[in-house]
Structures are given as structure tokens and as C-alpha cells.
Image (cartoon, rainbow, N blue to C red):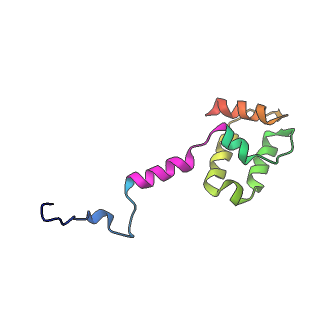
């Protein structure tokens, strides 16, 4: 480094592959969900709804509202909630909070 020349790591040449720290950071941000994030994704849902009706709502939601990666993560979490009728968003958030 005394010559002022910075040597590039051949594993990460430009355009080929992201550095692991950047790649992992993106995944962490994309996969981190909270009960309030899921509640936002469910905005516009008419309640009461059953667990399966909530799942259908998420499946049919536009991709711009939720995003493909988040949609599959949300469905994965909703799959774990109790099978019952949910009468308001607070009930859904509480149940999801137990899962997270």
C-alpha cells in the first residue's frame, strides 16, 4: 500500500458478485418483519376474517404494496397463527407478536 495502489480482491471484481456483508445486510432488511409491518400489509382488509381469508387477502394483494419477498415472509408467519376469526387488527397484531 506504500505505493498508493489499492489491490482489488479477485473474488469481488466489479459486476460479478456483491460482498457478503452487503448481500447479508439486504437479506436482513428484507426479511425483518414486525407485527406493525404485517398490519400495514393488511391495511384495507375488511374484518372479521378467518386465518384462511387473511392468507387469501395477502396472496391477492398487489406486489407494490407488500413486495414479493415480504409477501412470502408474511404468509409464512400468518400460517403459524391460531385458526380462528379475527375481529380487529389489534387481535391480529397480538397473535403475530406471539409468533415473532
Residue 79: tell me if it is visible. no
16 displayed left or right of 87: left
66 vs 49, left or right, is left
**Does 68 lie within the magenta span?**
no
Residues rendered magenta in the picture: 21-35
Q: Quarter of the image holding residue 3? A: bottom left
Viewer-closest of 33 and 53 = 33
Q: Residue at point 65% right, 44% down?
A: 76
At 39% from the left and 51% from the top, the residue drawn is 21
Q: Nearer the viewer, residue 48 or 35?
A: 35
Q: Main secondary structure of the magenta part?
A: helix
Q: Position of residue 29 (x, y in %)?
A: 53, 48
Query: Residue at coordinates 69% horizontally, 60% vertically from top-left?
Result: 64
Left/right of residue 86 with respect to residue 32 in the rendered view: right
14 above or below 96?
below
In terms of depth relative to the viewer, which is nearer, 16 or 8?
8
Image x and y of residue 47, in percent: 86, 40
Q: Position of residue 45 (x, y in %)?
A: 82, 46
Residue 11 percent across, percent down from the top left: 30, 63
Amino acid at each position: 500500500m506504500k505505493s498508493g495502489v489499492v489491490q482489488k480482491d479477485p473474488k469481488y471484481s466489479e459486476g460479478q458478485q456483491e460482498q457478503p456483508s452487503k448481500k447479508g445486510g439486504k437479506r436482513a432488511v428484507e426479511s425483518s418483519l414486525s407485527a406493525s409491518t404485517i398490519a400495514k400489509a393488511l391495511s384495507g382488509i375488511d374484518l372479521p376474517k378467518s386465518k384462511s381469508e387473511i392468507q387469501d387477502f395477502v396472496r391477492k394483494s398487489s406486489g407494490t404494496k407488500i413486495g414479493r419477498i415480504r409477501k412470502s415472509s408474511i404468509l409464512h408467519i400468518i400460517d403459524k397463527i391460531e385458526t380462528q376469526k379475527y375481529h380487529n387488527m389489534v387481535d391480529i397484531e397480538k397473535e403475530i407478536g406471539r409468533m415473532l
